[in-house]
């Protein structure tokens, strides 16, 4: 497995590997089984698998969240290698956002609802970094998790609107045995908070907004940002809550409507 720190190195490494298909899995590291499921899907469908490992400052709307985001590059590289990744692109913030950087891509409407309403600028950061990653790696396929349903929808719109030549592949949400969706931010939960956080998947599992809100209202130590039906592809019941200092999102697919 190669590790590239610069855009130039990445392009150079990929030049001879274009013919058999290139799959890109964008990540912010702190890898868990959710990430590994994306890597495994990419491994099955492409001759070359690229994983980006970049904690994108532009998509954090809170300094504290960025500062405390879990980072363990050594572990991530080991897991990526075990998953059969060919190339990891792990740039510095300066490589991605050089001095004077001022070009942004904004998926205006989709980027401003739900998560976007609570995290201003978040999806602008996501869309911009993904477009840049697509341009650097030029993948045939890019892999995203259904866990971040609105992110998938933003990327789908970005690809359609800008006629990008990349196929969007979406993998199902991976959950712990107790139902909690895997997330790098789960590491911040104390055992007690983690127990409280289970209220979110349990509420969403009702697949009914009112019932979900009722269950969450009864849950101690869980503050609701929103629970909404979102008309995505496929439609989902999506929710965001705060447990202690940790913000968690989740969704369930509403396919039987
Ligand atoms: P992140 O490192 O959090 O930016 O996530 C990188 C990719 O992994 C995104 O496409 C996420 O949607 C996806 N992902 C994160 N958690 C999960 C999960 N529990 N199941 C499936 N995919 C996930």
Image: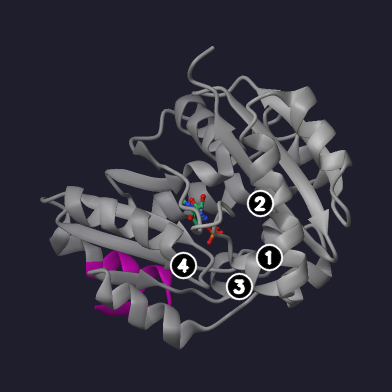
Evaluate if marks 4 and 2 touch, with contact meaning CB atoms under 8 Å apart: no
- Element type where label 1 sits in the image: helix
- Element type where label 2 sits in the image: helix
Q: Quadrant of residue 250?
A: top right
Mark 4 or 3: the one toward you: 4
Q: Earlier in the sequence, mark 2 or mark 3?
A: 3
Residue situated in front as seen by the camera: 129 or 77: 77
| Above or below for 71 versus 42 | below
Query: Magenta residues, as a range?
Result: 1-13
> For mark 1, what is the residue?
57
Lateral position of residue 225 relative to residue 202, left or right: right
The structure residue drawn at horizontal position 34% and vertical position 82%, both measured from the top left corner, is 78
Query: Would residue 145 be seen by someone viewing this image from the given angle?
Result: yes
| Above or below for 227 versus 143 | above
The structure residue drawn at horizontal position 57% and vertical position 44%, both measured from the top left corner, is 148
User: Where is residue 29 shown, x and y percent of the image?
Assistant: 51, 70
Lateral position of residue 216 relative to residue 166, left or right: right
Query: Would residue 113 be seen by someone viewing this image from the given angle?
Result: no
- Element type where label 4 sits in the image: loop
Query: Mark 1, residues whose alpha carbon is within 10 Å: few (<14), some, or many (≥20)?
Result: some
> From mark 1 to mark 4, how far is it between C-alphas?
21 Å
> From mark 4 to mark 2, how far is it between C-alphas?
23 Å
Evaluate if marks 1 and 2 touch, with contact meaning CB atoms under 8 Å apart: yes
For residue 32, the mark is: 4
> For mark 3, what is the residue?
93
Q: Is mark 3 within 8 Å of ligand 1?
A: no
Evaluate if marks 1 and 3 touch, with contact meaning CB atoms under 8 Å apart: yes
User: Where is residue 100 shown, x and y percent of the image?
Assistant: 70, 64
Evaluate if marks 1 and 4 touch, with contact meaning CB atoms under 8 Å apart: no
> From mark 2 to mark 3, how far is it between C-alphas?
13 Å
> From mark 4 to mark 3, how far is it between C-alphas?
23 Å
> From mark 1 to mark 3, how far is it between C-alphas?
7 Å
């Amino acid at each position: 497995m190669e590790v590239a720190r610069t855009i130039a190195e990445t392009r150079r490494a990929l030049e001879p590997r274009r013919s058999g298909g290139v799959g890109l899995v964008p990540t912010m590291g702190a890898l868990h089984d959710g990430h590994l499921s994306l890597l495994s899907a990419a491994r099955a469908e492409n001759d070359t698998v690229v994983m980006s490992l970049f904690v994108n400052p532009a998509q954090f709307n809170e300094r504290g969240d960025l500062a405390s985001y879990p980072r363990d590059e050594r572990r991530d590289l080991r897991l990526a290698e075990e998953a059969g990744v060919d190339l990891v692109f792990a740039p510095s913030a300066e490589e991605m956002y050089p001095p004077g950087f001022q070009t942004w891509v904004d998926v205006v409407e989709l980027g401003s609802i739900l998560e976007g309403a609570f995290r201003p600028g978040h999806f602008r950061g996501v869309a911009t970094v993904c477009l840049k990653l697509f341009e650097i790696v030029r993948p045939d396929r890019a892999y995203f998790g259904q866990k971040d349903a609105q992110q998938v929808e933003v990327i789908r719109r970005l690809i359609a609107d800008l006629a990008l030549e990349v196929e969007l592949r979406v993998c199902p949400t991976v959950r712990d045995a107790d139902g909690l969706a895997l997330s790098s931010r789960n590491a911040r939960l104390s055992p007690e908070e983690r127990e409280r956080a289970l209220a979110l998947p349990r509420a969403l599992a009702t697949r009914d907004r009112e019932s979900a809100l009722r269950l969450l209202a009864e849950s101690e130590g869980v503050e609701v940002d929103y629970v909404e039906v979102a008309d995505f592809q496929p439609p989902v019941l999506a929710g965001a809550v705060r447990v202690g200092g940790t913000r968690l999102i989740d969704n369930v697919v509403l396919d039987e409507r």
